[in-house]
Amino acid sequence: MIDLSTVYAVAAVGYALATVVLVAWLRRLPRDRRAYCYPAVVAVGVSAVTTALSLAGVGVFALDGATLDVPSVLDDLVAYPLLWATAALLADESRRTVGVFVAVPAVQVVAFNVASVVGGLVGLVGIVAVIGGHVLLAYLLLGPIWARAQRLPDRQRLLHWKSRNLLLFLIGMLIVFAVLGVAGVFDTYVAGVLAEYVGALIRVGFAGFLFANVDALDVVREGRDVLGIHSSAANDPSGDGVLGDD
């Protein structure tokens, strides 16, 4: 059986190669669409570095029978907020709404790692926060944000629809595996392999999907830059975004 250190080494090399490919691909994209792809590149690049640090044992601590992997925590704190924020940006959401899609995943990451280290009642609260956060993001994406997305051009709306479904499914699957791992259903080896496999699917898979379909974005509409400060407000006569105007 391949040991976990080999799995982490393969993952680190894979992330590094994926980063190189994405950077080269990024240079071939139209300049006005690159801003949507930067977060995905950063997520993959940071994973290459943090996985290598975890492999070297840098920032990995044993705490009362549990393991705190600081590079892995930092990796998740960067990757998941960036990817969720990208899904919101693809729907041309306001900065406030995008901020929610940054804050909620960050809270989930912290809550899960506290749960895995502390356990007990605090751990249970952490797991509830992780699951509740995913339910909240799903509600926003499937409800109010999807309603607002109807004003988008067809191709961009389809890109947002596919990206949000991809993240909801893959991150939902990761949460299920992670919770089962904390509950002791998987041994350390299986939990580690599953975490690396699903994590790579989320980061590299989402990046590849976005890069391959970024031409569907209608970057400039009605003389406005979609990433501009007032883009969402201009599209909403009431002046209110999903969670309020900027």
Image (spheres, rainbow, N blue to C red):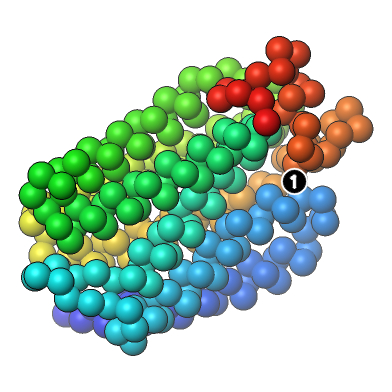
Q: Residue at x 47, y 77 (%)?
A: 49
Left or right? Give the position of 54 relative to 43: left
Name the quadrant containing residue 192.
bottom left
Q: Residues within 10 Å of mark 1 (few under 14, many from 20)?
A: some
Residue 61, horizontal then vertical, whole percent: 23, 77
Q: Where is the N terminus found, in terms of image quarters?
A: bottom left
Q: Assign a secondary structure to mark 1.
A: helix
**What residue is pinned by disc 1?**
215
Q: Is residue 1 visible?
A: yes
Residue 217, horizontal then vertical, whole percent: 74, 40
Residue 148, horizontal then vertical, whole percent: 62, 20
On screen, 42 above or below 149? below
Residue 53, horizontal then vertical, whole percent: 39, 81
Left or right? Give the position of 193 relative to 77: left
Comparing 135 with 200, the one in front is: 135
Name the quadrant containing residue 97.
top right
Q: Residue at x 66, y 25 (%)?
A: 245
- Residue furthest out toward the right: 223
Comparing 216 with 69, the one in front is: 69
Q: Is residue 208 visible?
A: no
On screen, 196 above or below 140? below
Looking at the rendered structure, the number of numbered marks drawn on it comes to: 1
- Residue furthest out toward the bottom: 56
- Residue furthest out toward the top: 238
Q: Residue at x 52, y 66 (%)?
A: 44
Comparing 158 with 124, the one in front is: 124
Name the quadrant containing residue 199.
bottom left
Q: Where is the C terminus found, in terms of image quarters?
A: top right
Q: Which amino acid type is shown beneath numbered disc 1?
A: Asp
Q: Residue at x 16, y 49 (%)?
A: 123
